[in-house]
Amino acid sequence: MTREGAYGVFEHELDAVRRRYGFVAAGYVLMPEHVHLLVGEPHRSSLSVAIQVLKQQTPRKLKQRGEVRFWQRRYYDFNVHRRVAQVPIEVNEPRLGAPGPSSAAAEGPRMDCRCILRFMTERLVRYQHCGDMHFLTFSCYRRLPYLGTPQARNLFEDALERIRKKYRFVVAGYVAMPEHIHLLVNEAARSSLDRAIKSIKLSVALRSRERPFWQARYYDFNVHNEEKRVEKLRYMHRNPVKRGLVEKPEQWQWSSFRHYATGEVGTVEIESEWTASRRGHRLPEHLRYAEKAG
């Protein structure tokens, strides 16, 4: 969605589908290439049917504008279990025999809601080959905890280091969580970063029982400056603590935190002051080749 008119069409169709299927919309945001929704379960049919209809109606309304293959096929779905009394929700269409708006407001909105995370337009834009670092996130299929065991996370680290060497890119930081991965890397010297990520995912999948192992695609954020680099590293390293997996970042073995804290050498080579010092403050080998060629 790149035009203001497209946003208006989507909002109109969202409200029409909401009324048709009888679900509560607690919040939403429209971005140029994806949508976030926080919604309740529909009273009529299923949530997946409602989302499918919403995704079908939007491109139909935009047909005269030449939009083709508007949406990606799947969507991310995260269940929100808590009651959140602070969120005001006006219940306009209660089910027959259900309590009306006044009693619902007194009880507080029931948050057996779902947060539909990023169902995306077909034209996903990535900015690569521009000299930036990249903060990448990719998830296991349907965010299932396929990386929930030490063996699975060790396998990922092995795959990451193998592909790092093969495609010649720098890993500035990473964390392997039970159901997703965060990486901070630069551009690959051989082929593209996109090809390198596909190779990492394939290497893990071929050595694992789960099918399919990975969710399609990945999130790519360009890191332009030192402030953002530090922000993303802190975010990654605090992730296991925030999730309650450990009490301190250094207790989570499958991240780059212990390397930055102590210089520990793990399975994955991390590009840092520790690493540069060990090689006599020279550039990584593949960057030295690039410098000579230039």
Image (tube, grey):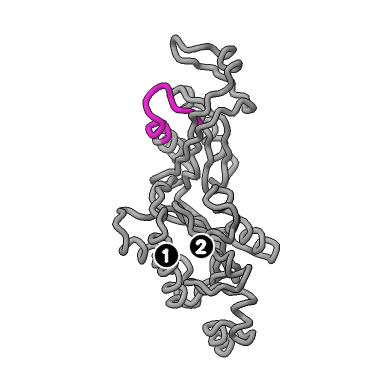
Q: In the figure, residue 201 lies in which quadrant?
A: bottom left
Percent x, y of residue 217: 43, 55
Which residue appears at 53% of the width and 48% of the height?
33
In three-dimensional space, the C-alpha distance between marks 2 and 1, rounded to whole angstroms, equals 10 Å
Q: Is residue 80 above or below residue 263?
A: above
- Give yes or no for residue 48 being in the magenta stretch: yes
Where disc 1 sits, the SS reads: helix
Say few, some or many: other residues with alpha carbon within 10 Å of mark 2 (under 14 / 14 to 19 / 20 or more): some
Percent x, y of residue 14: 50, 31
Magenta-highlighted residues: 39-51
Looking at the picture, tell me which residue is in the foreground, 75 or 278: 278
Q: Is residue 45 above or below residue 292?
A: above
Q: Which residue is mark 1?
A: 154
Instruction: Name which of mark 2 and mark 1 comes first in the sequence.
Output: 1
Q: Is residue 61 above or below residue 198?
A: above
Percent x, y of residue 71: 43, 45
Check whether the beta carbons of the residues at disc 2 and disc 1 lie within 8 A of each other. Answer: no
In the image: residue 82, left or right of residue 150: right
Tell me if residue 249 can be seen: yes
Q: Amino acid at mark 2?
A: Gln
Percent x, y of residue 235: 61, 56
Q: Which residue is mark 2?
A: 253
Tell me if residue 216 can be seen: no
In the image: residue 93, left or right of residue 74: right
Where disc 2 sits, the SS reads: loop
